[in-house]
Image (spheres, rainbow, N blue to C red):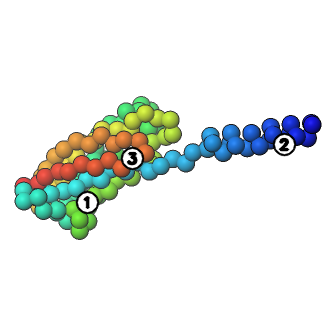
Amino acid sequence: MITRSILILSIGAVLTGIGSCRKKADTIAKIYVLDHNNNRVSGATVKLSGMSTEQGHNAVREPKVATTNEQGEATFNYNDIYQLGQCGVAVFNIEASLGGAVGNGIIKVEQEETTKETVFIP
C-alpha cells in the first residue's frame, strides 16, 4: 500500500514538472519592402528603432539593421529582449531605404510570434 502511494506521488510529481517546463518560442519581426508598383525590393536597408515596453535591462537602446533578401524581406530576431511571462515586447519605428528612396512605418512586435509589416518606398 505504501509502495503504491509512493509510486503514484512520484508519477504525479514528474508529470507536474514536465507540464511546467515550456520552451520559449521565437519572437521575430519581418519587414517586407515594396516599391510603388508593389514589387518586392531586394537590397534595401531596413532599420528598426524604438523603446521596449520593459524598463531597465530589457530596454531596446540600439537600432537593429538588416538588408532585404531577394523576396524583399528583412528579418529581425528579438529573442534577446523577450522573457517568458512578459506581456508584449516592443513597438518599433521602421525606416527602409534604397538609394535616395526612403519609406517609413511602425511595427508592434508580439511575444513568441512572427510579426509582419510592409513598408513602401517610392
Residue type of the residue flagged with mark 2: Leu
Q: Secondary structure at mark 3?
A: loop
From mark 1 to mark 2, how far is it between C-alphas?
A: 54 Å
Percent of width and height locating residue 21: 61, 44
Of labels 2 and 3, the one closer to you: 2
Q: Is residue 115 left or right of residue 85?
A: left
Q: Which residue is mark 3?
A: 113
Instruction: Determine the residue positioned at 23% across, 65% down.
Output: 71
Of labels 3 and 1, the one closer to you: 3
Instruction: Determine the residue positioned at 25% across, 53% down.
Output: 31
From mark 2 to mark 3, how far is it between C-alphas?
A: 39 Å
Q: Which mark is residue 61?
A: none
In this rendered view, identify the residue nearer to me: 6 or 21: 6
In this rendered view, identify the residue nearer to me: 67 or 28: 28
Image quadrant where one finds the N terminus = top right
Percent of width and height locating residue 107: 26, 43
Q: Which residue is mark 2?
A: 7
Q: Relative to 120, is 2 above or below?
A: above
Question: Of label 1 and label 2, which has the lower sequence position?
Answer: 2
Are dots 3 and 1 in contact, CB under 8 Å? no
Are dots 2 and 3 in contact, CB under 8 Å? no
Q: Which residue is mark 1?
A: 73
Q: Is residue 107 left or right of residue 103?
A: right
